[in-house]
Each structure stands twice: as C-alpha cells, then as structure tokens.
Amino acid sequence: MSARAWVLVLAATAALAPADAAAAPAPAKELRARDRVPGATIASSFADLARLVADPDGPRDIELLAQTYRGDLTIDRSVAIRGVPGSVLEGTGRSTVVGIRANDVTLEDVLVRSSGRRHTAEDSGIKATGARVRIADVRVEETLFGISLQDCKHCTIERAHVHGFGDDAELRGDAIKLWEADDSVVRDSTVEHSRDVVVWYTKRALLDGLGVRGGRYGTHFMYAHDSIVRRSRFEKNVVGVFVMYSMRLHVESSVLAGARGAAGIGLGFKDSDAVVVKDDWIVANTTGTYLDNTPRTPDAPVLFEGNALALNDVAMRLNTSEKGLAFHGNDFGENAVMIEADGGADALGVDMRGNHYADYEGYDLDGDGIGDVAYEVKALSSELTETRPALKFFHGTAALGLVDAVARAVPVFAAKKLLVDPAPLARQPAIREPEGGTP
C-alpha cells in the first residue's frame, strides 16, 4: 500500500469513528486578551449595557467586564461591543440573546448563551439584520439557532464557535444561517452537533476555513450564486455539502468525509451550473459525489479537477447522463463502486480524461504516464440491480462482485459501458490533504 493510501485510510478511520451527537461542548476557547479601546465606556451591569446601547447619543465603543450580563439585548444603532476573557452575554431563555438591527455593528470576544426555544421566532444566540455587521471571536452555546444573518449585506463572522443545543438533532436550529446576506463571509469558524449551516438566497458568500462536524448538512446552498467554499472541513455529517439551484459555485481545497447512512453524500448538486470542484478530498462517504441534472445545460459546464475520491461506497452517482460535466486529473482510490447511474442511464456523456483509478488494469509501455488502453466501467451488477431493485440489498457483497468479475473476464456477459476514460493516468497524482477547518 502506498504512503498516500495509508494517509487516506487514516483519514477515513477518523471520519468513521463514532460521533457522539450528545457530546458536551468542547471547553470554551479562551477569549483573546487585548488592550482596551481608548475612550471606550465600560458597562458595569446588564442594565447599564442596555441603557448605553439604547441611547442614540451613546458611546460608539462599549467594553464588557469579565462577568455575566443576564438579559436579552437589542441593538438598534451603530456600536462596537467588546468583551474580555470571562465576558458572558446570557439570555433569559425566552428570546434571541443578541438582536442586531443596525448597520456597522461590531460584537467581539464574548460567550453568548441561553436563547429561547421557539422555532417560529427562530430564537438565536445572535441574529443580525443590517450591513457591515462584524461578529468575531465569539462562542455560542445553549441556543436554538446559533448565528443568523438575515438581510445582512457585507457582514462577517470570524473565529466563531457554535455548539448545537440538545440531544435531538431534529429539534435543533441552524448553527449559522445566511439568508439574503449578499457578500458576507464566514471565516475560520467551527460548528459542532447542530442542524445545518445554511446559505440561501445569498450571492457571493465566502466560507473560508469552516469546520462542521456531527450535523445534518455541513452546508446547504440554495440560490447561492457565485459563492465559494475553501479550506474547509466537513466530517461525520449526514451530508457534507449540498448545492441546489446555484450557479458558478466553487468548492476548493476542502475535506468532505464520513457522510454515512442511506442518505450519506459527501458533495451533492441538483440543478446547478458552472460549478468548479477542485483540490478536495471526498473520502469515506456512502456516496462520494452526487449529481442530479448538473449542469442543466452544456453551455454552463461543471468541472471536477484534482480531487481525491477514495474509500466511498459509491464514488460517483448520476441521476441523468450529463453533457457538460468533466472530471480531469482526479484520483479515484479504493471505492467499492466507481459509478452508479440511476434510471438505466450511463456516464458516457461525461468528459472523463486524465484521471487515476486504483483498479486500472492497463499498461503504459511508452512511459508517458498515460495508460495505453482506456479505462472502462462495465458493471453487469448495476444492470441487475436496476431491473431487480431487491438485489441492491447484496450491493458490495462477494456475490455481486463475482458477477462483475465474470463480466470482465467474459465480455459477452457484460452490459453496456457506463463510463470511459480514454487517457487514464498510469501513476497516482500527488494530491495533498487540504488544510483548514477544525471541526
């Protein structure tokens, strides 16, 4: 086994280790020590803080002490509130803890906890509406929803840590929610044991260095055109990243691992166009990548380039035969099944070229690094399971494996081709594990 294969195995082992959905929050990160802002006003109690914030002529900069401020805070003007290690904003347990309804607000260096439990009101740790709101170096816990940006343009979440509430995943709210939050950024933040990270109806969102673990959707994009995921890590979620009805979305230099169970998908797309997936590790999922009507037209091509898809039950699953879909320079390693195409479709319309396949049985006599014979997938078992769905119960067993082995050895038994790469790589490419994202 190559060194890279060992790395993949170790990554998969970590991804498949049992996730304790009811685990206690990790110890709170020590909030940074920093110099006080010159001229800032110190709030001595929650009543004092609420009074200072409510005063339209109040100070621009407010400093918190190392104590607990109990109450639900509403911010309706531009202000910067900064804490120190030990600063806590604790809600009443009946509503949103910090509600922001203004432009140019900053909230930094504070622990936020104890929201209400009303799904209809989306009670949150922090809920912001406005522009240029900055939320940095915060920890949010014991809240229904974590941090919600709604109609919040050019807003930023940096170095946040959100831990979901309660043991029942279905009753949790979203950890981070971007709704009509164009040009907003989530950077170097961590989410644990929550429901989803949501980016809906939001253009040009950037998720950079996000880590999500033990949730439902690591991130769910919908109508999120021109958005980017990079340097992020999605582990042990039901689905790593799923994208719907979005154009020109990039997923780069990220890890999507350990999405298990019947619905487990590392990276999925539905009705999306002009997508680029580059330099990612898609490892140890039930389905590595799922594409449904993506791209919708060949005029908006979708490219997978330089990715490692390894140790998945199914590396690629297509709902239809997609023209305009290309896989170049990827490494398919030790997947149980290379491809499944629903509805009797195939992947012959996919531009597969220059990929490496662990099960490639060809040769490279001229030594140019390109296999001299095409890589082909002819899976008789796939045709059998399509026509007789009950046989899917035996998927991955020695019995169906023998069916495919016979089909390869005796081509007359083989069904139609599912996939062809005319120029497979004879040597494994060097695809480094992405850095960033710490779930």
Image (cartoon, rainbow, N blue to C red):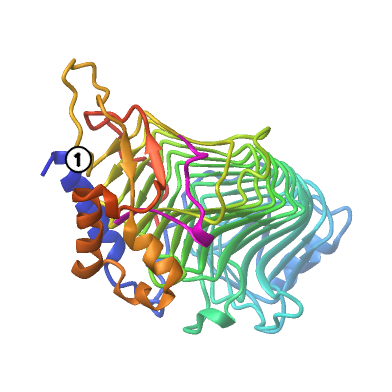
- In depth, the one of 343 and 169 nearer the eye is 343
Check the image and name the residue furthest to the left: 1
Res 258 visible: no
Asked if residue 181 lies left or right of residue 385, the reply is right
Span of residues in magenta: 337-351
Q: Quadrant of the N terminus?
A: top left
Residue 381 percent location from the top left of the image: 33, 62
Residue at 18% from the left image edge and 49% from the top image edge: 409
Residue 205 percent location from the top left of the image: 66, 44
- In depth, the one of 158 and 191 nearer the eye is 191
Q: Secondary structure at mark 1?
A: helix
Residue at 34% from the left image edge and 72% from the top image edge: 19
- In depth, the one of 230 and 416 nearer the eye is 416
Q: Quadrant of the C terminus?
A: bottom left
Is 359 situated above or below 200?
above
Check the image and name the residue furthest to the right: 56
* Residue placed under numbered mark 1 in the picture: 4
Residue 273 percent location from the top left of the image: 65, 41
Mark 1 residue type: Arg
